């Protein structure tokens, strides 16, 4: 090798060694600009409550603004498709409810996202049970009377949901198959308008989270007939569980997770996961969640991936048995 060539090679090697730490430092610099946190429902529901609290806490830990964006509609598909198309750079995060990853893809094979290929799981965030609620004018005092009334009026009792393809929707379908009643689904774009419809008497029933319905129940604006958990809630200790109400096996809960676009660097996913773990252990977060009926959770990305797989299979069976479709 001639002297000029050796000198050139040495210079290139030196430049390469100098560039490596710079590139590594650039990768470790995340985040260095504001982050978007997508919530697939309008303001007012459990997902929005979780998103805003976690967004506030993440901004403190990551030292960057976290901007919460509500992208409602199409049973959470609009938000999911937006996130799936976003750059995998750690600057687009998403609150992903169970229904978005496990229900909607089973109900609509044409959704423009794949729950297993288009997202990188980060962590579970929270879980919450559901309530079977009725408008005060409906002449029932408990779940048994509701079933009797619904059987006497097939197709005339209506229930609202926070959107087609959500757990609010499928909880009603599960109720129908387990009790043998025929009730009519009326979808809305989010929990807030769905519960407003119940309060206004536009629909007879709603299946929604303890977070959303407990204030209305405590205020006497609606009647809670059952809570879909194995145990009674400290928030509404007088409300029977599904089993106590004669609805054995009707157990439904909703979990919420954080996902990012597939291809997001593992270093960013791990940094996010660690931050979410810190947040989930904060007494303030646990107290705020508990006051809303939520239980704060944290998991590894791998555990969340396993849950998505198992719940996807579970709800596929419910959909097949009920014949549920998107309205």
Image (cartoon, rainbow, N blue to C red):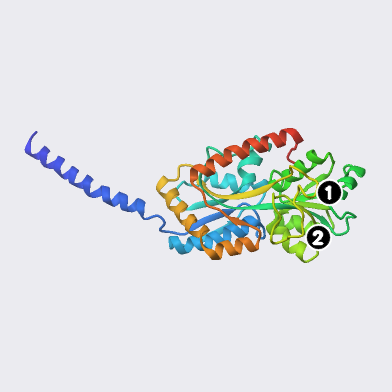
Up-down relation of residue 110 to residue 195 (above or below): above
Name the residue tied to disc 2. Answer: 222
Residue at 77% from the left image edge and 54% from the top image edge: 240
Q: Who is closer to the viewer here, 43 or 249?
A: 249
Mark 2 vs 1, N-terminal side: 1
- Left or right: 5 as drawn, with respect to 327: left
| Quarter containing the C terminus | top right
Q: How many marks?
A: 2
Residue at 69% from the left image edge and 34% from the top image edge: 317
| Quarter containing the N terminus | top left
* x and y, in percent, of residue 187 in the image: 75, 48
Label 1 sits on a secondary structure element that is strand
**How far is mark 2 from mark 1, CA to CA?**
15 Å
Q: Who is closer to the viewer here, 56 or 218?
A: 218
Up-down relation of residue 26 to residue 112 (above or below): below
Is the residue marked by circle 1 packed among few (<14), some (14-19), or many (20+) residues within 10 Å? some
- Left or right: 46 as drawn, with respect to 183: left
Q: Which mark is residue 263?
A: none
Res 155 → quadrant? top right
Q: Which mark is residue 158?
A: 1
Is the residue marked by circle 2 packed among few (<14), some (14-19), or many (20+) residues within 10 Å? many
* x and y, in percent, of residue 205 in the image: 81, 52
Residue at 57% from the left image edge and 61% from the top image edge: 286
* Residue 108 visible in image: no
């Amino acid at each position: 090798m001639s002297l000029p060539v050796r000198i050139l090679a040495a210079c290139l090697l030196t430049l390469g060694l100098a560039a490596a730490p710079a590139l590594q430092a650039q990768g470790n610099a995340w985040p260095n600009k504001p982050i978007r946190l997508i919530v697939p429902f309008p303001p007012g529901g459990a997902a929005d409550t979780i998103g805003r609290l976690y967004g506030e806490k993440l901004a403190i830990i990551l030292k960057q603004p976290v901007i919460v964006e509500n992208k409602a509609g199409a049973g959470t598909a609009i938000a999911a498709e937006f996130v799936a198309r976003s750059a995998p750079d750690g600057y687009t995060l998403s609150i992903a409810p169970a229904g978005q990853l496990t229900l909607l893809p089973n109900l609509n094979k044409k959704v423009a996202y794949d729950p297993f290929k288009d997202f990188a799981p980060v962590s579970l965030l929270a879980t919450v049970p559901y309530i079977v609620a009725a408008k005060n004018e409906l002449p029932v005092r408990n779940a048994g009377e509701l079933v009797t009334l619904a059987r006497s009026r097939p197709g005339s009792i209506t229930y609202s949901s926070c959107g087609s393809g959500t757990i609010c929707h499928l909880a009603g379908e599960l109720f129908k198959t387990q009790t043998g009643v025929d009730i009519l689904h009326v979808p809305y774009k989010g929990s807030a308008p769905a519960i407003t419809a119940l309060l206004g008497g536009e629909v007879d029933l709603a299946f929604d989270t303890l977070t959303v319905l407990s204030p209305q129940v405590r205020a006497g604006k609606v009647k809670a007939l059952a809570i879909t958990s194995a145990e009674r809630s400290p928030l509404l200790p007088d409300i029977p569980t599904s089993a106590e109400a004669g609805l054995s096996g009707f157990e439904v809960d909703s979990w919420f997770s954080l996902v990012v676009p597939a291809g997001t660097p593992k270093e960013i996913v791990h940094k996010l996961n660690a931050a979410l773990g810190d947040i989930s252990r904060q007494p303030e977060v646990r107290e705020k969640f508990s006051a809303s009926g939520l239980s704060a959770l944290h998991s590894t990305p791998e555990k969340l991936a396993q849950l998505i797989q198992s719940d996807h299979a579970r709800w596929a069976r419910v959909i097949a048995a009920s014949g549920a479709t998107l309205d």
